[in-house]
Image: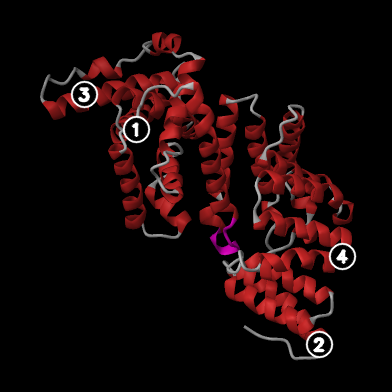
């Protein structure tokens, strides 16, 4: 019997969080757990093509990883000789008793423990994301470094520092209690959202390296949803990521220029992702406890449900942003609400909301892009040009800058001045 190599890769990826979490429970050391998992994967790559896939890949990997980890400890401490090879490699049916001992509570606790450790409050957000991508997702240091546009050496140091902080903080490896689960769940969700944003914010030229982060964030969100199937905010988070990523194929033109939502070819949107996201939102809304992720997902859903831009329910979007403003007051939320207000009540009403935000968002590209657009609609061309110039200076990607230059060129043509180049 021959196992399909692609199936093996998928099985190892899917099993990683639970297996590393279980090995972490055994060895109480991140490096030891990760090394034991890697050794178990090597043995799987050697045994599974010859013997076929085991009945339960997770149990097999935990069993082999635990044995090889113990062997490594014994070799290091010289406390006992190594066991014979056949004690580890003759695995005809050894996973059966392991499967019987693995119940839902162990599965949940092991994965939560792993995620909670990666999101420990001692770690800055950048280290949380890097550590989660390495330990939970299994991305290589090279892949993570490429996604964050840093060198492999710098990323290796970042991950090493994160592990050292966890060791110094004396993080408990016991199963998290109910109170801690509730408190830390928000941190895990935030970490997953950060991973997604790292991929989503990539420009056209970076998409090949960073867009996979969106897929990984969605995979982790689905995993978290399996652990908390009745939690409306986790439904909302998963739905939000799905609905945002569903538009990936329509976000850039052939030259790499950014395409605004209202100008996107909706035929390119991923309808399967949209259907999954909408179903989650409908289910979550029945709980009548909308939190920030669910509210953002509901806004994205209104865009997804509109067959044409003019069908968008801007009144409902403005209402949802107002609710989000009350839950999590933020100048960025107010800025987004101003877009809906512009659609409903015109550019002057929206500009009245945007201008007071300048002091707090003085380095924010989107504020000056929106301000320039509103001023242009009002015929205040000189002020619009200044806002567009500021937006270009603050652009995070060439695509963002190119999009503003398009508006600026249009403005210059309307005013009779020659269009700018460069």
Label 4, label 2: how far apart the Cα atoms are: 22 Å
Position in image of residue 286 (x %, y %): 77, 27
Label 1, label 4: how far apart the Cα atoms are: 53 Å
Residue 282, numbered circle: none
**Circle 2 residue:** 415
Q: Secondary structure at mark 3?
A: helix
Position in image of residue 262 (x %, y %): 79, 59
Q: Secondary structure at mark 1?
A: loop
Q: Secondary structure at mark 2?
A: loop
**Circle 4 residue:** 346
**Circle 3 residue:** 71
Residue 171, numbered circle: 1
Label 1, label 2: how far apart the Cα atoms are: 63 Å
Using the image as rendered, state which of residue 406 and residue 12 is in the foreground. 406
Task: Classify 10 Å Cα crowding around label 1: few (below 14), some (14-19), many (20 and above).
Answer: some
The residue at 16%/21% (across/down) is: 82
Using the image as rendered, state which of residue 95 and residue 52 is in the foreground. 95
Task: Classify 10 Å Cα crowding around label 4: few (below 14), some (14-19), many (20 and above).
Answer: some
**Residue 319 forms part of the magenta stretch:** no
The residue at 89%/56% (across/down) is: 310
Q: Secondary structure at mark 4?
A: loop
Residue extent of the magenta highlight? 201-206
Give the quadrant of residue 339: bottom right
Q: Please state which of the two labelled residues, at mark 2 or mark 3, is closer to the viewer.
A: 2
Are the residues tagged 2 and 3 within 8 Å (C-beta)? no
Are the residues tagged 4 and 2 within 8 Å (C-beta)? no
The residue at 18%/18% (across/down) is: 83
Label 3, label 1: how far apart the Cα atoms are: 25 Å
Label 4, label 3: how far apart the Cα atoms are: 70 Å
């Amino acid at each position: 019997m021959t196992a399909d190599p692609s199936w093996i890769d998928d099985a190892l990826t899917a099993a990683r969080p639970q297996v590393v979490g279980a090995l972490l429970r055994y060895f109480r050391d991140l490096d030891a757990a990760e090394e034991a998992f890697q050794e178990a994967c090597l043995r799987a790559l050697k045994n599974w093509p010859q013997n076929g896939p085991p009945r339960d890949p997770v149990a097999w990997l935990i069993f082999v990883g635990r044995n090889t980890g113990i062997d490594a400890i014994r070799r290091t401490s010289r406390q006992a000789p190594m066991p014979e090879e056949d004690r580890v490699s003759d695995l005809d049916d050894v996973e059966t008793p392991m499967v019987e001992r693995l119940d839902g509570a162990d599965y949940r606790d092991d994965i939560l423990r792993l995620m909670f450790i990666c999101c420990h409050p001692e770690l800055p957000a950048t280290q949380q994301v890097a550590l989660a991508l390495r330990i939970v997702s299994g991305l290589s240091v090279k892949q993570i470094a490429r996604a964050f546009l840093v060198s492999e050496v710098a990323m290796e140091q970042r991950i090493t520092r994160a592990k050292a902080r966890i060791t110094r903080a004396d993080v408990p490896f016991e199963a998290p209690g109910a109170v801690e689960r509730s408190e830390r769940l928000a941190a895990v969700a935030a970490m997953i959202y950060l991973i997604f944003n790292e991929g989503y914010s990539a420009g056209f030229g970076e998409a090949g390296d960073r867009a996979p982060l969106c897929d990984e964030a969605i995979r982790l969100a689905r995993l978290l949803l399996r652990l908390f199937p009745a939690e409306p905010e986790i439904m909302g988070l998963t739905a939000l990521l799905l609905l945002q990523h569903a538009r990936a194929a329509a976000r850039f033109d052939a030259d790499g220029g950014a395409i605004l939502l209202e100008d996107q070819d909706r035929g390119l949107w991923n309808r399967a992702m949209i259907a999954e996201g909408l179903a989650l939102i409908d289910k979550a809304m029945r709980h009548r406890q909308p939190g920030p992720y669910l509210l953002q997902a509901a806004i994205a859903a209104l865009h997804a449900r509109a067959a044409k831009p003019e069908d968008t329910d801007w009144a409902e979007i403005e209402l949802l942003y107002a609710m989000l403003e009350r839950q999590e007051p933020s100048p960025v939320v107010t800025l987004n609400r101003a877009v809906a207000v512009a659609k409903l009540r015109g550019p002057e009403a929206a500009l009245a909301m945007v201008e007071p935000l300048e002091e707090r968002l003085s380095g924010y590209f989107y504020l000056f892009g929106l301000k320039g657009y509103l001023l242009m609609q009002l015929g205040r061309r000189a002020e619009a040009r200044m806002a567009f110039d500021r937006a270009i200076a603050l652009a995070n990607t060439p695509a963002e800058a190119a999009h503003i230059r398009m508006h600026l060129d249009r403005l210059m043509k309307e005013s009779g001045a020659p269009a700018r180049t460069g």
